Amino acid sequence: YNRPDLVDEAIHQLVTVAKHTYDADKGLFYHAWDESRSQRWADSLTGRSPNFWGRSIGWYAMALVDNLDYIPVDHPRRGEILALVQTLAEGMAAYQDPESGLWYQVVDQGGREGNYLEASVSSMMMYFYAKSVNKGYLPKKWRANALDAYNGLLKHLLVLDGKHRVSLTQCCAVAGLGGNPYRDGSYDYYINERIRDNDGKATGPFIMGCLELQR
């Protein structure tokens, strides 16, 4: 749109998210951050929410690679976004389930009762890895992570019914923080949000990821 100031603002927002939500020990990004520390879900010292929700990381991953389409190659801060792509790729790879190739609803607690392999984060990460490789943001070895996610989605979450209709299952319908009734960001909150088939927040990234794998 010929608005370089908006490019600068987008970079500022992406870097600010990382500054306040990234946990170096876990290699993951928390769902949210409250600067005022006034929300009940916010840690009193850091302002961070208590858990790593898969789709929130997936949204951020997609935002990183999609914003790079509009950040000029000679922009002085482009390297910061490329570094975040590498950081996120390495962090999420550590939690990609080795048996299914997918990611859990609460990313770092795969073995905990009630947690489940979730379609939207798995589709978003497939897209992220595939596009990052296609664009040269990540080395080609990372394509394997996208392919593992793709094959896992086909094997575990795509279901064909008796009428030859395909459904993408195990999609978290929605999750957030605060509001009324109050969403506290606890583990129990995330695993008990409604699960449905063919949610657009999963099917859209799934299609986008498949297209990237075909490039």
Image (cartoon, rainbow, N blue to C red):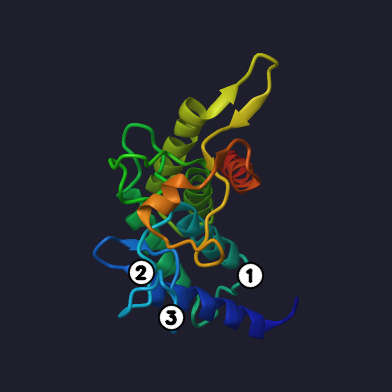
Identify the secondary structure beneath mark 1: loop
x 52%, y 49%: residue:
124
Question: Label 3 amino acid?
Answer: Ser
Earlier sequence position, callout 1 versus callout 2 = 2
Q: Distance from label 1 to label 2 (Cα)?
A: 24 Å
Residue 79 in view in this figure:
no
Q: Distance from label 3 to label 1 (Cα)?
A: 35 Å
Identify the secondary structure beneath mark 3: loop
The percent position of residue 144, horizontal first and vertical second, equals 40, 40
x 48%, y 61%: residue:
183
The percent position of residue 190, horizontal first and vertical second, equals 44, 51
Frontmost residue, 185 versus 142? 185
Residue 70 is marked as 1
The percent position of residue 199, horizontal first and vertical second, equals 63, 42
Q: Residue furthest left?
A: 25
Q: Residue beneath label 3, please?
A: 38
Earlier sequence position, callout 3 versus callout 1 = 3
